Image (cartoon, rainbow, N blue to C red):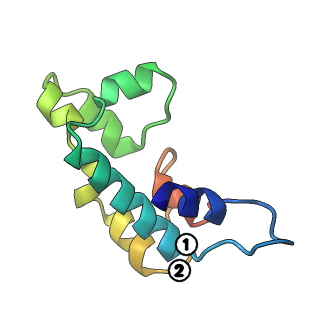
C-alpha cells in the first residue's frame, strides 16, 4: 500500500491527480526503508553502486568501508537531508543521488 502511495505521488500526470507534498513523499520513503530493514539487512551499498544505482556523497563514503554490516546500514537515518525532506516542503537538497532531493523536486 505504501509503495502504491509513493508511486502515485511521484506520478507526472498532474491533470488527473496532483502530486503529494514533498514532505509526505519523504516520510513514505523513510517508512518503506524502515519496513525493508525489519525484513532483514538492506543490500550493501557497494552492490547497489555496482548494479548501477546512484549513491549520494555520504553513501559513497560508507560504500568504501570494508564492512558489510556498515554498508547494510541506512545512512539516511542520520542524514540532515532526510530531516529536511521530511519537515520542509521542497527543501533545498541538491545532493546528487539523494532520494530526498528527488522527492523535493531537485
Q: Nearer the viewer, residue 100 or 27?
A: 27
Residue 16, by quadrant, is: bottom right
Instruction: Kindly identify the residue that appears in the image at 49 percent across and 31 percent down.
Output: 53
Can see residue 91? no
On the image, the x and y values in percent for residue 14 come to 81, 70
Q: Nearer the viewer, residue 86 or 17?
A: 17
Could you classify mark 1 by the number of other residues whose Cα lies within 10 Å: few (under 14), some (14-19), or many (20 or more)? Answer: many
Can you give x and y, in whole percent of width and height, for residue 50 in the image? 43, 19
Residue 35 screen position, x and y as percent: 29, 53
Compared with 61, 81 (above or below) is: below
At a point 38% along the width and 43% down the height, the residue shown is 57
**Disc on res. 89:** 2
Percent from the top left, x then y, of residue 20? 61, 74
Mark 1 residue element:
helix
Name the N-terminal-most of marks 1 and 2: 1
* Depicted 67 relative to depicted 54: above or below: above
- To which residue does mark 1 refer? 22
Amino acid at each position: 500500500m505504501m509503495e502504491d502511495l509513493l508511486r502515485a505521488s511521484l506520478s507526472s500526470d498532474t491533470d488527473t491527480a496532483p502530486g503529494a507534498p514533498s514532505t509526505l513523499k519523504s516520510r513514505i520513503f523513510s517508512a518503506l526503508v524502515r519496513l525493508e530493514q525489519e525484513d532483514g539487512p538492506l543490500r550493501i551499498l557497494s552492490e547497489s553502486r555496482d548494479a548501477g544505482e546512484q549513491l549520494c556523497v555520504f553513501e559513497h563514503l560508507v560504500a568504501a568501508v570494508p564492512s558489510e554490516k556498515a554498508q547494510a546500514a541506512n545512512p539516511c537515518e542520520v542524514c540532515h537531508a532526510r530531516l529536511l525532506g521530511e519537515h520542509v516542503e521542497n527543501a533545498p537538497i541538491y545532493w546528487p543521488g539523494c532520494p530526498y532531493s528527488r522527492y523535493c523536486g531537485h
